[in-house]
Image: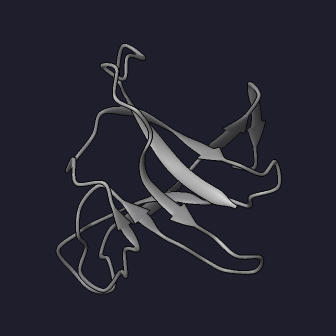
Amino acid sequence: MKVAIQLFDTTGSNGGIDPVGTLTVLPGETRTFGTMSAAGINVDSLVGVGIIRGSARIIATSKKPVCTAFVADPGSAPPAVAWQLTIIKKNAQKGD
């Protein structure tokens, strides 16, 4: 399947920017998207926007991707500070 990320600011606007960082993901494969490089974390698709304040949407050509989102301290390996973000699917929260 093809997977991409679409970023939004705090108002929910993406400024007309199309999804970025498109990758082909094979069954059972793990891929990582990042808004900036991070020590100790291999980023397959660097969307190159740095720190964002807002939200992101994962777009895929399949309805079956399994996703995890997290924030990590980019300067230390392993990250000294990191936390998992809540994933929302069709306005229903998935997990904590």
Q: Percent from the top left, x then y, of residue 47?
A: 30, 54
The part of the image, by quadrant, that contains residue 16 is top left
Image mark count: 0
Q: Is 19 situated left or right of 80 in this image?
A: right
Question: At 69% across and 49% down in the image, what residue appears?
Answer: 96
79 to 66, vertically: above or below? below
Q: For residue 41, which quarter of the picture?
A: bottom left
Side (left or right) of 74 relative to 88:
left
Front-lying residue, 60 or 82: 60
Q: How is the image coloured?
A: one colour
Question: Residue 59 location in percent, x, y?
Answer: 61, 43
Q: Is 64 drawn above or below residue 43 in the view shown? A: above
Q: Residue at x 29, y 75 (%)?
A: 80
Residue 22 lies, in percent from the top left, at 47, 56
Quarter holding the N terminus is: bottom right
Q: Nearer the viewer, residue 59 or 84?
A: 59
Give the image location of residue 45, x and y in percent: 38, 66
